Image (tube, coloured by chain):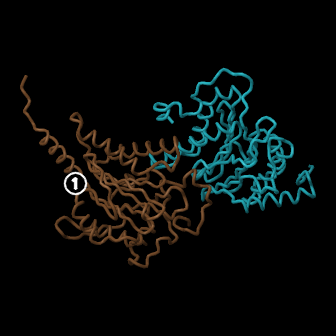
Chain colours: A cyan, B brown
């Protein structure tokens, strides 16, 4: 990134001269991303809808990307900028790894992403914010970790579960009631799909599972074996079983009252 | 002020070439061979940390003989060039030919610039194709010329003798174990014709394996897998046996990970 800013500053996000603001800019927005840790790793999932104002811009956008072998980023905010940021982030991690012959620490990766978000602040002030969620497996501590960000690049580590995007409020409430410390990988996968369903239920900019078009949430798992994205069969199975239960109980599983 | 002696340009260049060749000849040789599923790099290297081979990009590997600080510099330059290309355009737009051209320009400029000493390095840039016909191997001597090689190539001190040895014995479609064996045989020959044993711990081996499911095809072969390959007798050695390799420089490519790690095409999944 330092090399780029010396040689081709125009290639970096956040280094562009913006035209004076004339009304809000309308660009496709990404929406709900959720993450949860379990014993031995972390899951990161995102819905598939991109909206532009009240129009659905895209039904099958992918918002969760591997950053490298042991980490992944889920993006919320302006899709175009966010995708570019992730691309640059992936490049930086790979570049570091090749030049140094070793991977960055998870903390180091999280800090790097923080700087990149901060460099986008001028754009964010014009309404083109990017707010990712970063999750990875920390090889040194041997556990999954989640980092959330705000538009100014402020970074905070989340314990247990986290969400970002317009539906994050609903997703977080949903996970608050369902999350337990001793989740297994499979349970954690179900948990994030439940949370996405709840987010889609109450937030118009978050898409639920689309059975007719076979569009299901993107669900990824990171463990000590590395990053893995569930294939369509696996994620559809989870989404369908959640859907099945919701046909009987539209509001999803009930938590104990006391 | 004294008048400098006149030195003819021919003489000056010959001296510089001689200087560079001597520098390269001090280092150990290394060989790069094509095999059925890709390209294998084999060299003698007592160090575990200072590599002679490394990954440049998805399908491109780099090997160097000579002075470490000089080729390390070129290697980092190459990684930068490749990453910048890939980011600006697309991952497919990074090619070994382009990279070799950049190296040739750099080496050529340094070689002919009177202000600098010539680099004492000889490089190999290799790209593995989807099919064996698509494999490319370029050798870049110290003076900035490019040689397009096929089958096998040796660089470093004893290169000429080793290449002759390899040329006679290398054939297309060798298995990894066969190619590795041949490479070790070639490297164990001393200039005076005698042979010596190179233990597995002193070998540095890496492959560009076209059958790897990941986008990044570079992989180091170390430890038990290396020992197993060295023991395997030629023909029957399975190249896709379950292995205990270290991942490339630590992993699967970011963009490549859409493909779930599968055990079917083997290689690096425990």
Q: Residue at x 51, y 36 (%)?
A: A1
Q: Residue furthest top?
A: A20
Q: Is residue A77 above or below residue A252?
A: above
Q: Secondary structure at mark 1?
A: helix
Q: Residue furthest front?
A: B133
Name the residue tied to disc 1: B25
- Number of marks: 1
Query: Residue B194 at what x, y percent from top left?
Result: 19, 70
Residue B222 in view here: no
Query: Residue B161 at what x, y percent from top left?
Result: 21, 64
Q: Is residue B270 left or right of residue A147?
A: left
Name the chain letter of the residue that bears numbered label 1.
B
Q: Residue at x 48, y 61 (%)?
A: B130
Residue B147 in view here: yes
Query: Residue A17 at what x, y percent from top left?
Result: 59, 24
Q: Is residue B117 left or right of residue A37?
A: left
Query: Residue A211 at what x, y percent from top left?
Result: 82, 57
Q: Residue at x 48, y 58 (%)?
A: B217
Front position in the image: A140 or B113 = B113
Q: Is residue A16 above or below residue B177?
A: above
Q: Is residue A204 left or right of residue B210?
A: right
Occupied quadrant, residue B252: bottom right
Badge 1 density bin: few <14, some 14–19, many ≥20, Cα 10 Å: many
């Amino acid at each position: 990134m330092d090399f780029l800013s010396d040689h081709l500053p125009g290639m970096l996000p956040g280094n562009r001269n913006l035209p004076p603001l004339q009304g809000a800019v309308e660009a496709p927005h990404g929406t709900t991303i959720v993450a949860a840790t379990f014993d031995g790793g972390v899951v990161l999932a995102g819905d598939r809808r991109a909206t532009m104002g009240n129009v659905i811009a895209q039904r099958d956008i992918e918002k969760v990307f591997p950053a490298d072998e042991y980490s992944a980023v889920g993006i919320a905010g302006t899709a175009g900028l966010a995708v570019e940021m992730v691309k640059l982030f992936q490049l930086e991690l790979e570049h570091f790894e090749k030049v140094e012959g070793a991977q960055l620490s998870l903390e180091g990766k999280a800090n790097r992403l923080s700087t990149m978000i901060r460099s986008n602040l001028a754009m964010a002030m014009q309404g083109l914010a990017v707010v990712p969620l970063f999750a990875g497996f920390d090889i040194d501590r041997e556990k999954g970790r989640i980092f959330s960000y705000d538009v100014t690049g402020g970074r905070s580590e989340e314990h247990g579960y986290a969400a970002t995007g317009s539906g994050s409020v609903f997703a977080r409430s949903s996970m608050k009631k369902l999350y337990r410390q001793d989740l297994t990988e499979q349970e954690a996968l179900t948990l994030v799909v439940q949370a996405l369903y709840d987010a889609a239920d109450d937030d118009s900019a978050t898409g639920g599972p689309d059975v007719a078009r076979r569009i299901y949430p993107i669900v990824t798992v990171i463990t000590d074996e590395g990053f893995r994205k569930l294939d369509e069969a696996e994620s559809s199975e989870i989404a369908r079983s959640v859907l099945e239960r919701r046909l009987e109980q539209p509001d999803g599983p009930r938590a104990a009252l006391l | 002020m004294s008048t400098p002696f006149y030195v003819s340009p021919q003489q000056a260049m010959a001296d510089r070439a001689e200087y560079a060749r001597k520098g390269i000849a001090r280092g150990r040789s290394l060989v790069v061979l094509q095999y059925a599923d890709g390209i294998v790099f084999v060299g003698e290297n007592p160090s575990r940390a200072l590599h002679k081979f490394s990954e440049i990009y998805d399908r491109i590997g780099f090997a160097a003989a000579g002075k470490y600080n000089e080729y390390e510099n070129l290697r980092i330059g190459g990684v930068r060039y490749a990453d910048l290309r890939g980011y600006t355009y697309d991952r497919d737009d990074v090619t070994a030919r382009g990279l070799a051209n950049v190296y040739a320009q750099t080496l050529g400029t340094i070689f002919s610039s009177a202000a600098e000493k010539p680099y004492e390095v000889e490089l190999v840039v290799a790209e593995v194709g989807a099919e064996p016909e698509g494999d490319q191997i370029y050798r870049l001597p110290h003076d900035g010329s490019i040689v397009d090689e096929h089958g096998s190539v040796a660089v470093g001190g004893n290169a000429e003798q080793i290449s002759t040895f390899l040329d006679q014995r290398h054939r297309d479609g060798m298995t990894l174990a066969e190619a590795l064996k041949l490479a070790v045989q070639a490297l164990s020959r001393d200039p005076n014709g005698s042979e010596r044993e190179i233990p597995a711990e002193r070998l540095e081996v890496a492959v560009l394996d076209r059958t790897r499911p990941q986008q990044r095809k570079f992989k180091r072969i170390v430890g038990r897998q290396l020992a197993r390959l060295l023991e395997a007798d030629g023909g029957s050695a399975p190249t896709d046996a379950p292995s205990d390799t270290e991942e490339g420089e630590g992993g699967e490519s970011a963009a490549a990970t859409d493909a779930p790690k599968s055990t079917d095409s083997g290689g690096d999944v425990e």
